[in-house]
Amino acid sequence: MKKLPLALTAMTAIVAGLLAPGGASASAGTWNDGFQYEDQMVSCATGQVTTGVSANVGWMSPTGAVPKVGEVFWLRGYAGLVGMPCSSGTNIIPEIMVPDGIEFAEGEVRWDISKPGEQVLTEDPISADPNGQNGGIMIGNADETPFKLRQGEILEFQFPVRATRELKGPATQQPQCQSRIDGDAPCPISQSGDHFQVAFLTNGHGGDRWYVTPFVGLFATDGSTPPPTTPPTTNPVPGPGTTPTPGTTPAPAPAPGSAAGQAASSTSAKWKITKAGKGKATITVTSGAAPVGGVIVKDKGRTLAKATLKATDNGRVVIKLPRLRKGKHVLVAQFRGSSTVAASVSPKRVVRLR
């Protein structure tokens, strides 16, 4: 990130709680949210596949118009734990990834973890690491621990920035790389055009992705052409519920059923595990349409192994499992689903190794 020294200076000030309180405020204007993203998990209440963590990002100009180069505007990210995990919740580490041409501005930085409708953004100190795993800035609690979300809670953070050049949003390369879609990693900043991503690294709720990474296109005019009277639409899909209003965060999207046009599916698994803990799973996905996509094997919500179901596999894949330790294991196989076939999960298999 070319602006890393500036980012480090500003984010260090955030940690110390020293940013000037008189900067631009997010109390005016309307938030323009982007491409919502979520992972899936097995609900502890129903045993069915449901939404796990749902997240989005957005931008807001206090003037209500596209910001000019050099003008302060605001970015935000938010994520909520929608599903009911069998654990106490999920740990979450956001990594802020801004495009070249964005620098952090002075002004109050606000954040909160709360239930919908109970939000009170504060300026309490947080920690920031400019050496993020994906080239961004990772943030967490002041003691450098991950944020913790319980079921129904939402984390939101807002911070001021300014553009140093013209920004054209979706007219530039969009972060639609396979690693972001699969949840293995966000798209590199160099391959994301004028888009703002937050890579939410999650762990503990049994989600099927390492990262939940929403993104939004950013805009700034250099003054050579008149800006539009209203900000351009940046959201290519419906947002998470209601239209955001200043100082509030909408609840993440409720757990969806099969999307329109998706064929239902069912997943079954045959397990072969030796007394020494070595084993494999033969997973079969049946559907009225050809099942293609990711397959995951989990033990008590923790991902053990992954595979990709191809069209040539005819709905069947064999996954070699890592060696299991002594004790109780609760194994399930989950088909992630695709645009044409809905996700599904196999019955649980309990294995005890002595």
Image (spheres, helix red, strand yellow):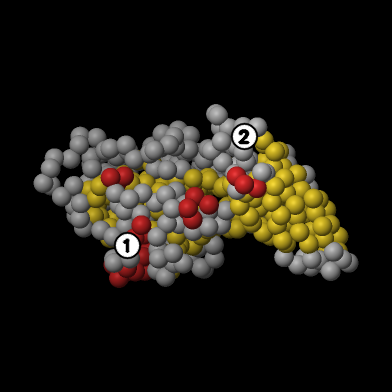
Rendered residue at 42%/70% (across/down) = 131
Where residue 314 appears, x then y in whole percent? 66, 43
Asked whether residue 153 is in view, the answer is yes
Task: Indicate the position of residue 312 as horizontal and vertical percent values.
Answer: 62, 47
Q: Quadrant of residue 305?
A: bottom right
Badge 2 element: loop
User: In the shown orientation, is residue 304 left or right of residue 137?
Assistant: right
* Residue ID at (56%, 57%): 210
Identify residue type, mark 2: Ala
User: Can you identify the residue that label 2 sits on?
Assistant: 289
Q: Is residue 242 above or below residue 205?
A: above
Residue 229 percent across, percent down from the top left: 20, 34
**Is 61 or 298 nearer to us in this picture?**
298
Q: Which residue is tagged 1?
A: 19
Residue type, label 1: Leu
Residue 257 showing in the rendered view: no
Residue drawn at x 23%, y 40% as measured from the top left: 65
Q: Counting other residues with Cα less than 10 Å from the Cα at mark 2, is it few (<14), some (14-19), or many (20 or more)?
A: some
The answer to whether residue 188 is left or right of residue 273 is left
Q: Quadrant of the N terminus?
A: bottom left
Identify the disc placed on residue 249: none
Please provide percent x and percent y for residue 223: 12, 47
Q: In front: mark 2 or mark 1? A: 2
